[in-house]
Image (cartoon, helix red, strand yellow):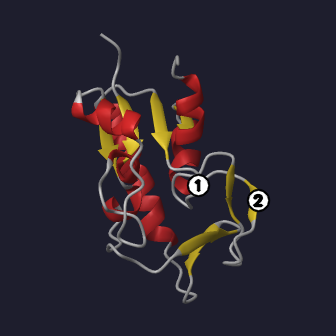
Amino acid sequence: MSEKLLVSACLAGFPCRYDGKTKPVKEIVELVESGKAIPFCPEVEGGLPTPRIPSEQLKDRVINEEGIDVTDNYNLGAKKALEVCQNNNISKAILKAKSPSCGVGKVYDGTFSGTLIEGDGVTTTLLKDNNIKVINEEDYLREIPQ
């Protein structure tokens, strides 16, 4: 049996995004429904409400659109995501592209102008630092045999 994956809850159909919506990906929903993946939202698990004020990374901090520093919430959510991975022997995660928590390779630049820069989200960084492979939903869909 293949090992379980950690997936962003919004990709699995849970309405936990900052705007209170979801971004379901059929193939990821099916992974959760079949017991092959565990859905997780680091922002919610870090204590932020849904919906919530949009946030972006600004250097080593996470700041919401009103200028409030929410870095501690993001760090707490990332630590909880790592605990889920460690407790379930998970070595791979599929996380939401461009998110300040879950972004892989590109995140918004902190200006709230829609500008993407090279970088990883807070949770992605912590998981990678602990030898967990992290990809986004676009990468995952490219991996699936057609």
Instruction: Decide: is 118 above or below 129.
Output: below
- Mark 2 belongs to which amino acid? Ile
Where residue 35 sits in the image (x, y, percent)?
23, 28
Q: Residues within 10 Å of mark 1 (few under 14, many from 20)?
A: many
Query: Residue most toward the bottom?
Result: 66
Residue at image position (32%, 60%) is: 45
Residue assigned mark 1 = 121
User: Position of 24 compared to 138: left or right?
Assistant: left
Quadrant of residue 98 within the rendered picture: bottom right
Residue at image position (47%, 29%) is: 92
Where residue 127 sits in the image (x, y, percent)?
51, 40
Towards the viewer: 78 or 1:
1
Q: Quadrant of the N terminus?
A: top left
- Mark 1 belongs to which amino acid? Gly
Q: Are marks 2 and 1 in contact (CB under 8 Å)?
A: no
Q: Can you see residue 94?
A: yes
Towards the viewer: 52 or 67:
52
Query: Residue most toward the top?
Result: 1
Instruction: Decide: is 116 above or below 27.
Output: below
Instruction: Decide: is 144 above or below 2.
Output: below
Where residue 11 sits in the image (x, y, percent)?
40, 48
Q: Can you see residue 131?
A: no
Where residue 107 sits in the image (x, y, percent)?
66, 58
Residue at image position (58%, 87%) is: 67
Q: Residues within 10 Å of mark 2 (few under 14, many from 20)?
A: few
Residue assigned mark 2 = 117
User: Position of 1 compared to 99: left or right?
Assistant: left
